[in-house]
Amino acid sequence: MTAPDLLPISVNICTYNEARDIGDCLDKVFANHPAEVIVIDGGSTDDTVAIARARGARVIQPGVKGLSSQRQAGIDAATQPYLAIIDGDDHVAPDFLATLLRELQTHGYDALLGREQAFQPRTYWERAMGSTNHGITYTETPVDTNMVGRPSLYRTAALRHCGFDPFFDGVGDEDTDLSIRMELAGFRQGIGTGLTLRQQTPGFGGIVRKFVKYGRGDARIVYKYPFKAGKLLFHLVVRYPFIRGFNAVARGEGVYWPFYLMYGWVRAGALLPELLRLWLRRPAHGPYPTRAPAELCGKPA
């Protein structure tokens, strides 16, 4: 493989104790031939860093444990005009990056989300999490969206313009916050056709902890963007447990309906006390510590 054959993409992978998955993740990423692979480690105590370096990744250790700050450190370190955000438990297809890059350039997107399926699901909870993607209508070409999670591909300039907010360190929704900032800035976001298989959380306790974390992130979205509160609460209290739950029943996956109820209601239950805590401490601590106020996040000329 010669330099001209490499895709002009920096791949950012944030890690924290990912020794089980990071080796295979990196093997799949390098098979996509990106020009640069950066692992941003949040202080792993296992062999994550050693495995990443042995696979040929550039490892940076910014001394923070929080996805927003880690992702921002990766953006700051990237050298390529396009940047992919991939998680350590992703197993991307061999053409994942090439597909998203072609679609992003051809259709004029600034960000494209990949398609996700569960990686070798064995438990009820892994299969249930995979079920949440069965109800998504995928098309043969990219479609517009206002929410890009991960794995995903961005124009690096768009990411640097909006950036990640450390307000979301330690909780979920840092990707939701970024998507809102990109929407406000006028950047175009979509869902592409590149495929990844993701290792899902296998047990009930891990699922509950994940949903509580997301719910705390949801609270920060409401706190920071009050105009999003109604839509977000409808999503948690109605859309996930009932609309998507009923759709799962209709396609023969009714066994996962309790999971859909949990997905919405556990998050909503975690949102309320976190939001109250934020409101109560605001007079003493001032407004949220954002990287750039949303109203100033205008798209550059």
Image (cartoon, rainbow, N blue to C red):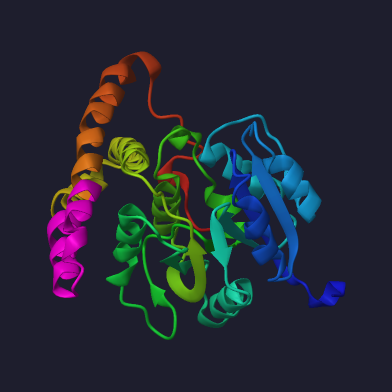
Give the vertical position of 50 relative to 7 (above or below): above
- Place of residue 14 in the rendered image (x, y in percent of width and height, measured from the top left): 60, 46
Q: Is 9 displayed left or right of 188 in the figure? A: right
Specify start and end residues of the magenta stretch as a single range.
239-263
Magenta stretch secondary structure, dominant: helix
Q: Residue sitting at 60 percent across and 48 percent down?
A: 20
Residue at the limit of the structure toward the top, as seen here: 284
Left or right: where does residue 136 sit relative to residue 43? left
Viewer-proximal residue among 2 and 155: 2
User: Where in the figure is residue 169, as x and y percent of width and height?
Assistant: 48, 34
- Asked whether residue 47 is drawn in magenta, I would say no
Please say if 56 is above or below 1.
above
Q: Residue furthest bottom?
A: 140
The residue lying toward the viewer, choosing from 10 and 79, is 10
Would you place residue 180 above or below residue 289 in this image?
below
Residue at 27 percent of width and 71 percent of height: 135
At which x and y percent is residue 195?
50, 72
Residue 109 in sight in this render: no
| Quarter placement of the N terminus | bottom right
Tell me where residue 256 appears, x and y as whole percent: 21, 59
240 in magenta: yes
